[in-house]
Image (spheres, grey):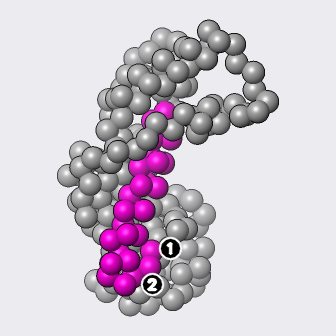
């Protein structure tokens, strides 16, 4: 399913925490707090969260991989061993677009760059949370349950090369995404994830 616009709420608290703040212990002077808020809102306005997801029938689960009905194999023992009883594999991808990171890279002040980077990262994570929640609701109407726990290529023992499956299967060029030769998604603040469906 395609979501050309995900209305992610402004993640103010999460941005502060990502930048190393502590909600009760970090003291910020009013002028710095005003600058932080201004940078964060400017960055947030440049984010354009979009996403796509799809489920794929599973034919077998081994200790090392998930085998799909089309013969594709998704390697990763950590993921497969925790999903032995799944019937489908959910794959989702989101991006916040390139405007926010292009603007970040053009800024001279390191502090502003840090805030822009934190905003883009938190918006991408929030977009994936939202995409997964929307998918869970849709799948529940089909009497299917989507796991809350998700895994991403490049973490644990799941190789980053799994991004190739995401890119082709979800047709991520429709989100203006590109897969480079090192298997990183572009724009930079893009997230892919897998979850089991029962």
Marker disc for residue 34: none
Marker disc for residue 198: 2
- Compared with 34, 43 (above or below) is below
- Can residue 53 be seen here? The reply is yes
Q: In this view, does 16 lie to the left or right of 101?
A: right
- Can residue 184 be seen here? The reply is no
What span is colored magenta in the figure?
119-146
Q: Is residue 144 magenta?
A: yes
- Compared with 19, 57 (above or below) is below
- CA separation, marks 1 and 2? 8 Å
Instruction: Residue at the far right: name it.
Output: 25
What residue is pinned by disc 1? 147
Disc 1 or 2, which lies upstream in sequence?
Answer: 1
Q: Is residue 50 magenta?
A: no
Q: How crowded is mark 2: few (under 14 residues within 10 Å), some or many (20 or more)?
A: some
- Compared with 152, 17 (above or below) is above
Residue at the image point whose x is 70% and y is 18% from the top: 28
Where is residue 111 drawn, in percent x and y?
A: 57, 18
Q: Residues within 10 Å of mark 1 (few under 14, many from 20)?
A: some
């Amino acid at each position: 399913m395609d979501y050309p616009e995900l209305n992610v709420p402004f993640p103010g608290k999460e941005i502060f925490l990502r930048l190393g703040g502590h909600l009760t212990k970090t003291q910020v002077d009013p002028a710095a707090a005003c600058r932080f808020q201004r940078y964060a809102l400017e960055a947030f306005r440049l984010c354009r969260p979009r996403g796509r997801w799809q489920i794929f029938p599973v034919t077998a689960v081994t200790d090392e991989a998930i085998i799909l009905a089309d013969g594709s194999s998704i390697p990763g023992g950590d993921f497969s061993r925790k999903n032995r009883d799944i019937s489908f594999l959910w794959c989702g991808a989101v991006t916040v677009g390139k405007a926010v990171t292009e603007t970040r890279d053009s800024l001279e002040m390191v502090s502003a760059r840090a805030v822009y980077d934190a905003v883009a990262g938190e918006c991408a994570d929030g977009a994936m949370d939202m995409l997964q929640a929307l998918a869970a609701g849709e799948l529940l109407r089909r009497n299917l349950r989507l796991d809350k726990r998700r895994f991403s290529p490049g973490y644990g023992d799941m190789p980053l090369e799994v991004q190739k499956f995401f890119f082709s299967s979800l047709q991520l060029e429709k989100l203006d995404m590109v897969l480079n030769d090192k298997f990183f998604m572009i724009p930079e603040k893009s997230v892919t994830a897998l979850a089991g469906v029962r």
